């Protein structure tokens, strides 16, 4: 009889592991989403600096921003420039992608200011 009990216990452990898999998947998805948020924020900073650099050289801030971000983030990127005195300020807004359909994590925004090149 002890042999039969061990077999049943092994089956019980397997079922417990199956019940734990959804929790592991949720933790993994949360980790990936946090990584996407951090990556998008980094890309917004890069876009803001590139847009400000382009605008300071009297080029298009939008084109500079679009060229600086990853291709799959470029569609959700906007970079308006504002001029004041001898400098230009660009605020890059990049839409944070979501791996969970229907969830919106908003936008990442970064600002950069550079002197105008005269």
Image: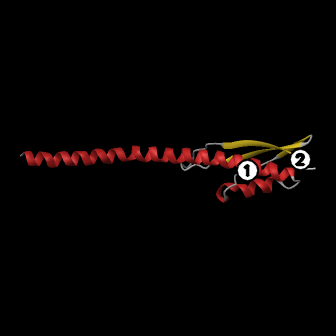
Residue at the extreme top: 85
Q: Earlier in the sequence, mark 1 or mark 2?
A: 1
Q: How many marks?
A: 2
Nearest to the observer: residue 105 or residue 34 = 34
Nearest to the observer: residue 55 or residue 116 = 116
Label 2: element kind: loop
x and y, in percent, of residue 75 in the image:
70, 56
Q: Residue at x 45, y 43 (%)?
A: 27
From the viewer's perspective, tell me whether residue 86 is left or right of residue 39.
right
Label 1: element kind: helix
Colouring convention used in this rendered image of the protein: secondary structure
Q: Residue at x 70, y 47 (%)?
A: 44
- Residue bearing the label numbered 2: 116
Q: In which image quadrant can residue 38 be found?
A: top right
x and y, in percent, of residue 7 in the image:
15, 49
From the viewer's perspective, tell me whether residue 113 is left or right of residue 1.
right
From the viewer's perspective, tell me whether residue 55 is left or right of residue 16.
right
Q: Residues within 10 Å of mark 2 (few under 14, many from 20)?
A: some
Q: Are marks 1 and 2 in contact (CB under 8 Å)?
A: no
Q: Can you tell which of label 1 and label 2 is closer to the viewer?
A: 2
Q: In which image quadrant can residue 72 be found?
A: bottom right
x and y, in percent, of residue 86 in the image:
91, 42
Q: Residues within 10 Å of mark 1 (few under 14, many from 20)?
A: many
- Residue bearing the label numbered 1: 47
Spatial CA distance of label 1 from label 2 is: 18 Å
x and y, in percent, of residue 21 in the image:
37, 47
From the viewer's perspective, tell me whether residue 9 is left or right of residue 103.
left
Tell me the tag on residue 13: none
Q: Residue at x 52, y 48 (%)?
A: 32
Residue at the extreme left: 1
């Amino acid at each position: 009889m002890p042999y039969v009990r061990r077999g049943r216990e092994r089956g019980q452990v397997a079922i417990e592991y199956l019940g734990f898999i959804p929790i592991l998947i949720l933790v993994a998805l949360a980790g990936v989403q946090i990584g996407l948020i951090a990556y998008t924020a980094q890309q917004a900073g890069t876009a803001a600096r590139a847009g400000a650099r382009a605008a300071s050289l009297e080029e298009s801030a939008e084109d500079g921003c679009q060229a600086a971000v990853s291709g799959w983030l470029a569609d959700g990127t906007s970079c308006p420039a504002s001029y004041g005195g001898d400098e230009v300020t660009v605020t890059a807004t990049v839409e944070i992608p979501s791996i969970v359909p229907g969830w919106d994590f908003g936008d990442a925004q970064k600002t950069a200011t550079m002197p105008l090149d005269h």
